[in-house]
Image: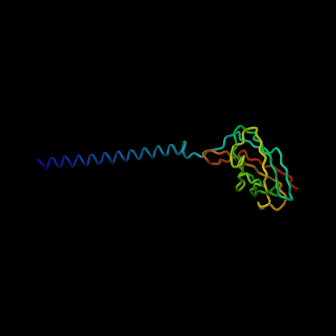
Amino acid sequence: MFKQFKEKRDKKAVSLMISYVLLIVIAISLSILVYAWLRGKWIFAKPECREGVSLIVTNYACNNTTKIINITIENKGRYNVTGYYIKGADSKTQKIMFPLKSSDRLSIVENGTYYFFGWEMRPLKPGEEDSSVFSYSVSGIKNPLEKIEIAPFITLNEYNIPCDKAAISQEVNCV
């Protein structure tokens, strides 16, 4: 009698163990499916810049002896813009462009990345203007500045998202 009871108990333990293994396998499978679905939908989708972001250069003034350019930018788009990437070239046909540096100590410019309103990092609202002073003396530009390229960006979740479609290229005459 004791032997029969032991065999039933062992079968019950094996059955219970198989059910736990199946439960774990189902839970892992469901988590993998949910992860793959979310990865494609929300979590890992690359954020894109909205259509309707637009910056224009309203005015510029150059001084080739000090190699400084003062640029006034206006937000002509429908959305706030956090800043822009600015590059310059000493030839109108040159494809390789050099990042410009800020001449203003209050501005944050690293590798041509300019944030509006310096340390406050307040975005430029539609219709607002911002004037900035840049130096192109240490950027690798040897001749007078002839072309600038400005690509705006917006900030989402602490990441700068470039608006490549809204990039502008402007010829300047810094002689």
| Residue 69 at x, y percent in the picture | 82, 53
Q: How many marks?
A: 0
| Residue 51 at x, y percent in the picture | 69, 40
Front-lying residue, 134 or 27:
134
- Drawn side of residue 33 relative to residue 10, left or right: right
Task: Name the residue at 67% across, 48% down.
Answer: 162
- Drawn side of residue 76 relative to residue 13, left or right: right
| Residue 148 at x, y percent in the picture | 79, 52
Q: From the viewer's perspective, is residue 136 above or below residue 9? A: below
Residue sitting farthest toward the left: 1
Q: Quadrant of residue 125?
A: top right
Front-lying residue, 144 or 109:
109
Task: Name the residue at 72% across, 44% down.
Answer: 166
Q: From the viewer's perspective, is residue 96 above or below residue 32? A: below
Front-lying residue, 14 or 154:
154
- State how the image is colored: rainbow
Q: Quadrant of residue 135?
A: bottom right
Task: Name the residue at 47% across, 43% down.
Answer: 34
Q: Quadrant of residue 47?
A: top right
| Residue 15 at x, y percent in the picture | 26, 46
- Drawn side of residue 149 relative to residue 65, left or right: left
Q: Quadrant of the C terminus?
A: bottom right
